[in-house]
Image (cartoon, grey):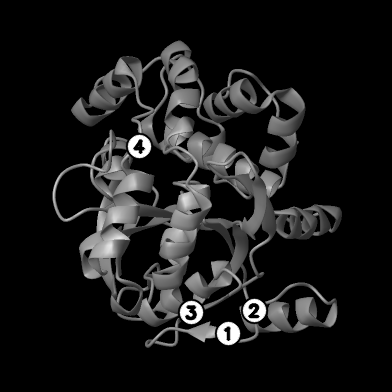
């Protein structure tokens, strides 16, 4: 069992989730011992990044009952989840910022890069009018979850869509305050960050993974949805985790079992061009979200994903790549009903 307030990740996670929730989520995740056992008054960028990911995983489960049920089943079997990656969606206009936020993926690159991530690859998602980017941690690429960070290009849609997108996403605010920016500057410069500061700032960093704009008018939501299910999803969910992904040994066998249990599984297994990366997912859970008229309506929320990765024989290490076809297929899990 995870314990000990002298451990950086434990202290950070329990500071934002509370002792009970923090222990539960830490005990359901497989975390590299070297990361988990980091002690002392200074917090490495790797430990801060891992604590951030643990808190985001908890938030995803809090919003996705199907995923939470699965994770409880895994824990009941005395197994742990290997958190492979989380996915985010952002919006980019042809020019300028997204309201008060830096444009598109820039809003998160400013967080990821100081915390030790680097952009590993770009994935054009042409059918969706989007671009995906993989951010992989330099210090522990297989142990610290990656991010699949996508941005929707407003200028690839018609002018009416652009006008609505500006009304909706142009109200975005920037959640990062000066203390958060100072912490990121310290990590970027290689300066030490103490536990007290990291604990104080972590909630602000986590606030970036949320909806930053005002609730949309339902009519505007419908215009976005008529052109892009992904834009409609961002309109209600913002920059929250779109999905979190469990790395499993045999995703095909797992999918077959979960289907037999009548879980809300995706029908088709997505297989990368290399054959080494295979993915499937639960369908998105429905959520109630407010609109500008004050009425809550049922819309697609986030979902829980599964992935298997084989060793890439060319490098002798786990293939941590993504795949454009896989991503496009997985994105359909949040498609709104017509």
Compute the Cα span from label 2 to label 1: 7 Å
Ranked by sequence position, the earlier of labels 3 and 4 is 4
Nearer the viewer's eye, disc 1 or disc 3? 3
Instruction: Give the mark nearer the N terminus: 1 vs 4.
Output: 4
Separation of marks 2 and 4 at Cα, in angstroms: 34 Å
Residue bearing mark 2: 266
Residue at the image position 23 percent from the left and 64 percent from the top: 159
Residue at mark 4: 171
Q: Dot 1: within a 10 Å radius of its alpha carbon, few (fewer than 14), some, or many (20 or more) residues?
A: some
Label pair 2/1, CB-CB below 8 angstroms: yes
Give the vertical position of 42 relative to 290 (above or below). above
Callout 3–callout 2 Cβ contact below 8 Å? yes
Residue under label 3, please give it. Answer: 329
- Give the Cα distance between marks 3 and 4: 30 Å
Does residue 89 appear to the left or right of 23 in the view shown?
A: left
Kindly identify the residue that appears in the image at 69 percent across and 44 percent down: 62
User: Looking at the image, is mark 2 or mark 1 nearer the viewer?
Assistant: 2
Where, by quadrant of the figure, is residue 131 drawn? Answer: bottom left
SS at circle 1: loop
Residue plotted at (23% across, 46% down) = 103
Q: Earlier in the sequence, mark 3 or mark 2?
A: 2
The one nearer the camera, 81 or 213, is 213
Q: Where does the N terminus fall, quadrant-wise?
A: top right
Comes first in the chain, label 1 or label 3: 1
Q: Which secondary structure lies at badge 2?
A: loop
Tell me the residue that label 1 is attached to. 269
Relative image position of residue 321 (x, y in whole percent): 36, 70
Nearer the observer, 311 or 153: 153
Q: Tag 4, which secondary structure? A: loop
């Amino acid at each position: 069992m995870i314990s000990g307030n002298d451990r950086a990740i434990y202290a950070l996670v329990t500071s934002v989730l509370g002792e009970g929730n923090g222990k539960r989520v830490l005990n359901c995740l497989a975390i590299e011992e070297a990361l988990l056992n980091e002690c002392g008054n200074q917090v490495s960028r790797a430990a801060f990044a891992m604590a951030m990911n643990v808190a985001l995983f908890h938030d995803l489960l809090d919003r996705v009952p199907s995923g939470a049920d699965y994770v409880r089943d895994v824990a009941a079997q005395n197994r742990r989840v290997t958190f492979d990656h989380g996915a985010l969606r952002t919006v980019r206009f042809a020019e300028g910022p997204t309201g008060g936020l830096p444009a598109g993926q820039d809003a998160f690159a400013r967080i990821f890069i100081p915390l030790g991530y680097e952009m590993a690859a770009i994935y054009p998602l042409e059918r969706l009018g989007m671009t995906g980017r993989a951010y992989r941690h330099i210090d522990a690429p297989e142990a610290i979850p990656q991010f699949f960070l996508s941005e929707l290009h407003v200028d690839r849609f018609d002018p009416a869509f652009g006008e609505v997108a500006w009304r909706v996403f142009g109200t975005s605010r920037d959640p990062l305050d000066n203390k958060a920016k100072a912490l990121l500057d310290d990590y970027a410069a290689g300066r030490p960050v103490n536990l007290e500061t990291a604990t104080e700032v972590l909630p602000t960093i986590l606030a970036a993974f949320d909806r930053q704009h005002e609730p949309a008018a339902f009519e505007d939501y419908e215009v976005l949805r008529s052109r892009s299910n992904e834009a409609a999803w961002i309109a209600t969910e913002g920059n929250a985790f779109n999905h979190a992904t469990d790395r499993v040994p045999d995703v095909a066998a797992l999918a077959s079992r979960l289907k037999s249990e009548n879980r809300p599984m995706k029908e088709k297994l997505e297989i990368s061009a290399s054959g080494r990366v295979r993915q499937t997912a639960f369908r998105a859970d429905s959520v109630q979200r407010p609109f500008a008229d004050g009425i809550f309506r049922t819309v697609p929320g986030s979902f829980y994903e599964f992935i298997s990765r084989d060793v890439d024989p060319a490098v002798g290490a786990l293939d941590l790549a993504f795949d454009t076809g896989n991503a496009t297929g997985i994105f359909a899990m949040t498609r709104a009903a017509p």
